[in-house]
Image (spheres, helix red, strand yellow):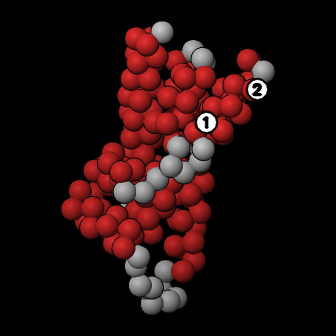
Amino acid sequence: MIESLQTFTAGLPELLQWVGVILAAAIPFIESHFGAALGVLTGINPVVAIVAAIVGNILSMLIFVLTAHGLRSKVTGRREPKVETARRQRVRQAFDKYGVAGVSMLGWLILPNQFTSAAMVSFGASRNAVILWMVISITAWGTIFGVLASLGFSYIG
């Protein structure tokens, strides 16, 4: 999948390759960290690749958070809670233990940022707190992975 995304991004006109990175980073499991690395490995300026990956991941995360918040507002109090899946239980346990900040920074190890952020909102976390901490997390991890890819790429090249 990563190779397909890299081929797609590299196939775009040079002035639009950052759009390919935004689109790739909006995909769950790719996110800012792999999106930034994808951009760097495609040959995009590392700063542009990192910023594009962060923007793509934040935009898709916002869609998930705002949708989850709207759904939670409509559903709250109308139905009994459904049985949670094993992954959702792991996110809830992490949420109960580490809070919004901890899950935002490390939740991508369990689930993609988009799903983790939506889950936290569905658990009752403040929408604004989730957005703030997810933006911090997406920016931090996108920057870290982009810089590492850039250093590794320049070291190899």
| Mark toward the viewer: 2 or 1 | 1
Q: Residues within 10 Å of mark 1 (few under 14, many from 20)?
A: few
Work out which residue is located at the far left of the displayed protein and give it.
97
The numbered mark, 2 or 1, whose residue comes first in the sequence reads 1
Against 142, is 59 above or below? Answer: below
The residue that label 2 is drawn on is 12
Identity of the amino acid at label 1? Glu
Front-lying residue, 101 or 156: 156
Identity of the amino acid at label 2? Leu
- Which residue is rendered at x = 41% and y = 30% of the image? 145
- Residue 74 in the image, given as x and y percentages of width and height: 57, 77
Front-lying residue, 112 or 140: 112
Residue 11 quadrant: top right
Residue 52 quadrant: top right
- What secondary structure is marked by label 2? loop
The residue that label 1 is drawn on is 3
Against 62, is 43 above or below? Answer: above
Q: Left or right: where does residue 7 sit relative to residue 26?
A: right
Residue 131 makes an appearance in the image: yes
Q: Residues within 10 Å of mark 2 (few under 14, many from 20)?
A: few
- Residue 77 in the image, given as x and y percentages of width and height: 47, 86
Residue 53 quadrant: top right
- Which residue is rendered at x = 68% and y = 31% of the image? 7
Front-lying residue, 150 or 2: 2
Residue 132 makes an appearance in the image: no
Q: CA distance from mark 2 to mark 1?
A: 14 Å
- Residue 60 in the image, given as x and y percentages of width and height: 59, 48
- Which residue is rendered at x = 40% and y = 16% of the image? 151
